[in-house]
Image (tube, rainbow, N blue to C red):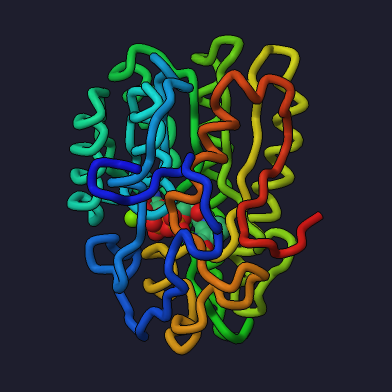
Amino acid sequence: MTHDGATDQLTFQDPVERFARITPPKQRQPEPGLDEDLTPQADRGESSYRGTGRLEGRRALITGADSGIGAAVAIAFAREGADVALSYLPAEEEDAQKVQQLIEDAGRRAYLFPGDLADGQYCTQLVSEAVDALGGLDALVNNAGRQIAVEDIADLTDEQWQRTYDTNIRSIFLISQAALPHMAPGSTIVNSTSIQGYQPSTQLLDYASTKAAINNFTKGLAQQVAAQGIRVNGVAPGPIWTPLQVSDGQPQEALPEFGKNTPMGRAGQPTELAPAYVFLTSPESSYVVGETLHVNGGMPSP
Ligand code: NAD
Ligand code: MG
């Protein structure tokens, strides 16, 4: 148990009951959406994630670190002993500052780098500024992503297609390319893919296909750099309650049922993803390379 009574991630319990089976009301935020305005609030592990020293002294860059899964990973990394550079959009400053405070509360350093990952120049500049601030780079988490549902291919614009591809997959290529020269043996890259990469929803043609591309890129790059002692892996979340879903990521009428179609019967919370990223970044996963770790409440995956 933690100080305020919430059970931490290492307490044995019924996983079905660990978090409420939420029925989110219809709601809409403009893209990118803020955790601050999410109803109900999501759990990023603020009062529950317990560190056990597994990332002591690591220097990590995390994209999309202001909210949702990225925020949960940033909080967990800090409590495991890592310093963290956070990338996010300028509109997310408030969410980012809250995560920065939580990292500092854990006794670690946090550096903020707002910018647009669809801009290639920001991607490469982000890496060099993060390396300067952190004094090096051992861990990269390519987690940022945009998801805008469009029901009919006739209404999917080329502009949206391009922006989704630039944000979700081109940025991973550019950031990884810029980061690798700074990474010593033992360093890691973890990319956020999705169950959508395997089971695409009809209204997510652009998004889901980027997630398949991320998964494939992860497995290819992993083989390329494995002999250098750098491990590249992916995490494929299922339905997780985050601002992505309420900023046109889902049709609004789908929100009350979000996550109930999983074998576990409920949506996941961002903090339930954090241990997967910690595992793939820590030395204990030394022989795990090019793997996709599915965290999705039981949805069958290859
Ligand atoms: P989120 O909205 O909290 O996080 C996504 C983040 O991506 C945003 O906070 C934002 O900072 C960043 N981002 C988006 N566009 C950007 C841009 N142009 N420039 C810079 N940053 C940008 O939502 P989340 O659900 O935590 O998403 C994190 C990752 O998890 C995404 O890659 C998403 O595809 C993936 N994922 C989420 C789910 C889910 O159900 N929530 C399921 C599978 C995969
Ligand atoms: Mg956000």
For the N terminus, the quadrant is: top left
Query: Which one is in front, 148 or 257?
Result: 257
Which of the four quarters of the rendered structure image does ligand 2 lie in? bottom left
For the C terminus, the quadrant is: bottom right
Specify whether 236 is left or right of 255. right
Picture residue at 23% right of the left edge, 23% below the top:
107
Query: Which one is in front, 54 or 208?
Result: 54
Picture residue at 37% right of the left edge, 64% below the top:
243
Query: Which one is in front, 241 or 174?
Result: 241
Tell me which corner region of the image, top left, top right, bottom left or bottom right, holds residue 281.
top right
Query: Which one is in front, 243 or 1?
Result: 1
Q: Is residue 288 above or below residue 273?
A: above
Answer yes or no: is residue 33 visible: yes
Specify whether 153 is left or right of 2. right
Specify whether 85 is left or right of 109. right
Specify whether 70 is left or right of 286. left
> Residue 224: where, in percent of width, then height?
75, 24
- Residue furthest right in the image: 302
Picture residue at 39% right of the left edge, 54% below the top:
68
> Residue 142: where, in percent of width, then height?
51, 40
Q: How many marks?
A: 0
Tell me which corner region of the image, top left, top right, bottom left or bottom right, holds residue 155.
bottom right
> Residue 242: where, in percent of width, then height?
40, 62
Q: Is residue 41 above or below residue 203?
A: above
Tell me which corner region of the image, top left, top right, bottom left or bottom right, holds residue 3.
top left
Picture residue at 45% right of the left edge, 81% below the top:
255
Answer yes or no: is residue 167 visible: no
> Residue 184: where, in percent of width, then height?
55, 10
- Residue furthest bottom in the image: 253
